[in-house]
Amino acid sequence: MTEPKQGDPNRPADAFAQRLQAARKKQGMDPTPPAQADGDKQPSAMGVGMRVGVELVASLIVGVGIGWYLDKWLHTMPLFLVVFVFLGGAAGIANVWRMMKPKG
């Protein structure tokens, strides 16, 4: 007895795949191709402004946290706090600079 070849509609796996595809299409569950690539969209001004603010604040918070923890651990108040505030600010500005730099 021979086994049905792949692509044969009488083969149970292929029949199931065809029925599944037809059902998904009928229900509208097949992903539609995007109208534009994501790289073509221009971000909104408010979105860019919010991202810039979050980048700067987050980098400063991380810098302050690291500096405070090191000062507390090494008993050197406020040496590392000051150093890491400047490093966090510089990292935030570098992130914003990279974000705003033209692509390409």
Image (spheres, rainbow, N blue to C red):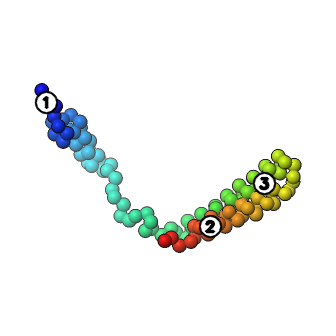
Q: Nearer the viewer, mark 1 or mark 2?
A: 1
Q: Amino acid at mark 3?
A: Gly
Mark 3 or 1, nearer chain start: 1
Q: Percent position (x, y) of residue 32?
A: 33, 56
User: Circle 2 — which element?
Assistant: helix
Mark 2, residue position: 96
| Residue plotted at (57% across, 70% down) | 100
Left or right position of 89 against 9 = right
77 is higher (above) or lower (below) than 91: above
Q: Quadrant of residue 39?
A: bottom left
Q: Which residue is mark 1?
A: 2
Q: Find out whether the residues at labels 1 and 2 contact each other: C-beta distance under 8 Å.
A: no
Crowd around label 2: few <14 · some 14–19 · many ≥20 (10 Å): some
At 76% from the left and 58% from the top, the residue drawn is 84
Give the farthest residue toward the left.
1
Which numbered disc flags the more N-terminal residue, 1 or 2?
1
Mark 3–mark 1 contact, CB under 8 Å?
no
Q: Position of residue 102 (x, y in %)?
A: 53, 73
Pick whichever, 30 or 85, lies toward us: 85
Report the disc number at residue 67. 3
Give the CA separation, mark 3 to mark 1: 73 Å
- Find the distance from the CA under tag 1 to the CA under tag 2: 65 Å
Image check: 9 left or right of 47? left
